[in-house]
C-alpha cells in the first residue's frame, strides 16, 4: 500500500470522528462518552451476554468491565449470572431507566443521521448513502480474522455443518457426507495439514482445509464462506492462505475437486490460476478437478 492510501484513511477517520461527535465527552448530549453510549445500544432491550459483547465490539475485557461498571453506577444496566444459572456466563440487561435511555439514544441517533443528510441535495444524499454502504462492507472485510483452528473446535464444526447444508441445497441430488470422500480431523492438523477458520467479531464466517499428501500434490478441501460476508474477498483470501501454507511446507502444487453447481467457486479457482485436469479421485459429487503450480 502507498503512503497516499494511508493518509487518505487517516483523513477520513478524522473527519468521521469529528462529524459523529466521537470526540465529545457527552455523546449526543446524553452525559456519557461514545464508548458507554455504544455499549448501551449493543446491550439493547433484549440484553446480551458479556462475552458476546466483548467479541462483537472487539473490546479488551478490562475496558469492557469499566464501561459496564459506569453504566451500572448510573442505574442503567444490571450484570448478573446468565439465565442458564452458569456463574461463568454473565449477562448484561437494561433496567427500566436503561430502556428509557436506550429509546432516547435511538431517537437522537436518527436525528444525527438526519443532520448529516439534511444539508445535502437529494443526489448527494444518495451518493453518501451508497459510499457509506461500500465503506461499511470494506471495513467489515478488514475486520475478518483468519487463523488455524482445530477441526474439532465448535466454531469449526458450525462452519462444516453450514457447508454441508448449503451443498445439500445446491447439489442436484442433495449431499450426504457419508457418500462423500471422508476428511479426517487428524489429516487437518500439522504436520499433515491445516484447518483455517475465518471469524468476524468472534463469529465463524468461513473455513478452508489443506491436506498435505506425502507423495502427491497438496489438496484443498472444505472451502466455504457464509452468505453474510460473500463478495468481500473472503474465499479468495482463504484460498491464498492455504496455497501459501502448502508452498511453505514444501509442496510444489495444489489441487482440488468441485461440483458443477458451485459456479462461484469454479469462477474463483479459474481466476486464481487453477487449470482443469483429469479426475484424480473418485469423489462422488465432483464434476471438475483443478490443479495449480505454486
Image (spheres, helix red, strand yellow):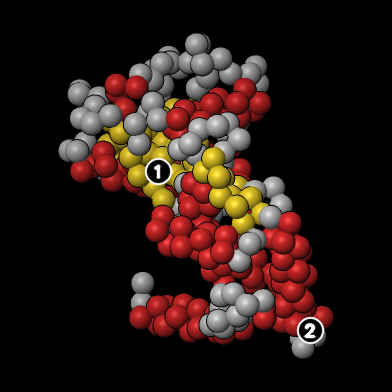
Q: Is residue 45 above or below residue 275?
A: below
Residue 185 position by quadrant: top left
Residue 221 position by quadrant: top left
The quadrant of the picture occupied by the N terminus is bottom left
Residue drawn where x is 54% and y is 69% of the image: 35
| Residue of label 2 | 118
| In-image side of 102 versus 1 (left or right) | right
Point out the tag, 2 or 1, that comes first from the N-terminus.
2
Q: Nearer the viewer, residue 252 or 241?
A: 241
Residue drawn where x is 35% and y is 36% of the image: 149
Distance between the Cα atoms at labels 2 and 1?
Answer: 44 Å
Residue drawn where x is 56% and y is 50% of the image: 79
Furthest-top residue in view?
179
- Residue 212 position, x and y percent, is 26, 29
Q: Nearer the viewer, residue 79 or 164?
A: 79
Q: Nearer the viewer, residue 166 or 29?
A: 29
The quadrant of the picture occupied by the C terminus is top left
The mark tally for this picture is 2
| Residue of label 1 | 239
| In-image side of 30 versus 123 (left or right) | left
Helix, strand, or loop for circle 2? loop
Q: Is residue 171 visible?
A: no
Question: How many residues crowd mark 1 within 10 Å: few (<14), some (14–19), many (20+)?
Answer: many
Furthest-bottom residue in view?
119
Amino acid at each position: 500500500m502507498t503512503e497516499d492510501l494511508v493518509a487518505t484513511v487517516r483523513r477520513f477517520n478524522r473527519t468521521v470522528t469529528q462529524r459523529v461527535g466521537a470526540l465529545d465527552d457527552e455523546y449526543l448530549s446524553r452525559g456519557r462518552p461514545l464508548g458507554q453510549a455504544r455499549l448501551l445500544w449493543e446491550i439493547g432491550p433484549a440484553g446480551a451476554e458479556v462475552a458476546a459483547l466483548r467479541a462483537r465490539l472487539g473490546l479488551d475485557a478490562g475496558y469492557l468491565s469499566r464501561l459496564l461498571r459506569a453504566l451500572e453506577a448510573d442505574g442503567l444496566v444490571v450484570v448478573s449470572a446468565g439465565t442458564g444459572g452458569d456463574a461463568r456466563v454473565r449477562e448484561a440487561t437494561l433496567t427500566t431507566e436503561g430502556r428509557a435511555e436506550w429509546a432516547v439514544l435511538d431517537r437522537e441517533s436518527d436525528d444525527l443521521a438526519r443532520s448529516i443528510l439534511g444539508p445535502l441535495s437529494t443526489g448527494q444524499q444518495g451518493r453518501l448513502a451508497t459510499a457509506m454502504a461500500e465503506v461499511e462492507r470494506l471495513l467489515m472485510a478488514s475486520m475478518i480474522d483468519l487463523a488455524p483452528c482445530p477441526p474439532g473446535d465448535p466454531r469449526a464444526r458450525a462452519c462444516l455443518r453450514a457447508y454441508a447444508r448449503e451443498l445439500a441445497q445446491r447439489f442436484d441430488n442433495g449431499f450426504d457426507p457419508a457418500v462423500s470422500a471422508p476428511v479426517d480431523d487428524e489429516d487437518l492438523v500439522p504436520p499433515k495439514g491445516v484447518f483455517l477458520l475465518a471469524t468476524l467479531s468472534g463469529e465463524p464466517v468461513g473455513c478452508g482445509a489443506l491436506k498435505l499428501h506425502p507423495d502427491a500434490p497438496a489438496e484443498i478441501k472444505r472451502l466455504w464462506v457464509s452468505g453474510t460476508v460473500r463478495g468481500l474477498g473472503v474465499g479468495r483470501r482463504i484460498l491464498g492462505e492455504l496455497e501459501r501454507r502448502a508452498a511453505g511446507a514444501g509442496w510444489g502444487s495444489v489441487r482440488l475437486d468441485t461440483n458443477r453447481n458451485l459456479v462461484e467457486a469454479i469462477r474463483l479457482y479459474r481466476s486464481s490460476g487453477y487449470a482443469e485436469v483429469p479426475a484424480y479421485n473418485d469423489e462422488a459429487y465432483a464434476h471438475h478437478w483443478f490443479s495449480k503450480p505454486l
